[in-house]
Image (cartoon, helix red, strand yellow):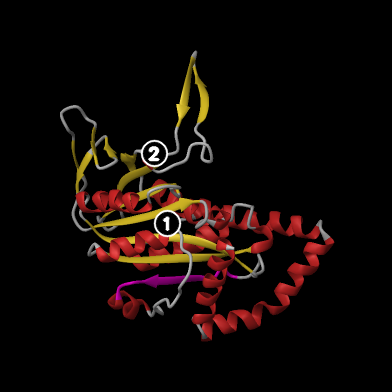
Amino acid sequence: MVRIARSADSLFSVEHVEWSEHPILQDAVLLAAFTGWNDAGDAATEAVSYLTRRYDCQRVATIDPEYFYDFASVRPSVRLEGDDRRIDWPVNEVRVGELDDGRPLVTVLGIEPRLRWRTFSEALLTVATQLSASTVVTLGALLTDTHHQAPVDVIGASNNEVINLELGLTPSQYEGPTGIIGVLNDAFHHGGFDSLSFWAAVPSYIGHNPSPKAALALVQQVVDFLDIPLGATDLQIAAASYDRQINELVESDPNLAEYAQQLLDEATDELTDMADNPQAMIDEVEKFLRQQDE
């Protein structure tokens, strides 16, 4: 059971974290994703959003955006609320819910920071420590040369040798540019947390479209790791609709249809290679990261 302890003024700030409620948790699981470089097809953030809704996670804190964003490139937005105009700033929200087995779930969802990544990592370490998280799972998605009808490839990586052995993960040998997910994984690992990351592959030729199919694959990976029921009916419906919509999009463009068919013809061999050689998918991740840097 999650218990909430409120401060006297119900709002206080510690190292860039503004708390509105202060839960007393034990052995929590922290799940995080960020829009931007790490989030092809919005798959990672949609997966965390779904699990946040699924477990009725309530907001307990936000990360102060003032220190971490260039507002000329990540602009706030204005909206009308009655006769008043309101400014909505880029926000990273911390929410707390409860899994089916009673374990606390902490979700962190927001935008990849543009500035002060080490300070941002320290802020999230503070969140994880104060909420007594023991396990941290980050999600990402990348663009690859895969067909939209093929099963979604998901790989896992961890800096923890025990987790790698338990899940049969191959330790990453990647060297090169990284996103906030890579920085956070390293920070949590050195902070003494059990940390791992799951990444889903999204077809490069439709990567600008949201991919509920890839989001569903990430959700499935997370619930398998946590050994809890899926219960993703609405996400499953969205994934089925996604396949139909992408089929129509591809069929309307002869060049795109030809390229997609070429990928489909190669899909069986590629999937076999991935199954026999997990390093092949890891190589795709490394290729993607280097291309982003270029």
The residue closer to the viewer here, 5 or 186, is 186
Percent position of residue 104, x then y:
26, 53
Residue where numbered disc 1 is placed: 180
Q: Which residue lies furthest to the bottom in this view?
A: 276
Dot 2: element: helix
The answer to whether the residues at label 1 and label 2 have Cβ atoms under 8 Å apart is no
Residue 174, picture quadrant: bottom left
Relative vertical location of residue 284 with respect to residue 238 in this rendering, above or below = below
Quarter the C terminus occupies: bottom right
Q: Which residue is drawn at 65% across and 63% down?
A: 204
Element under disc 1: helix
Q: Given the current orientation, which residue lies at the most extreme right position?
A: 254
Q: Which mark is residue 281?
A: none
Query: From mark 1 to mark 2, how far is it between C-alphas?
Result: 15 Å
Looking at the rendered structure, the kind of residue marked 2 is Pro
Does residue 175 show up magenta in the picture?
A: no
Across and down, in percent, residue 124 comes to 30, 51
Given the image, on which type of amino acid does mark 1 rest?
Answer: Ile
Q: What's the mark number on residue 65? A: 2
Q: What stretch is highlighted in magenta?
A: 151-160
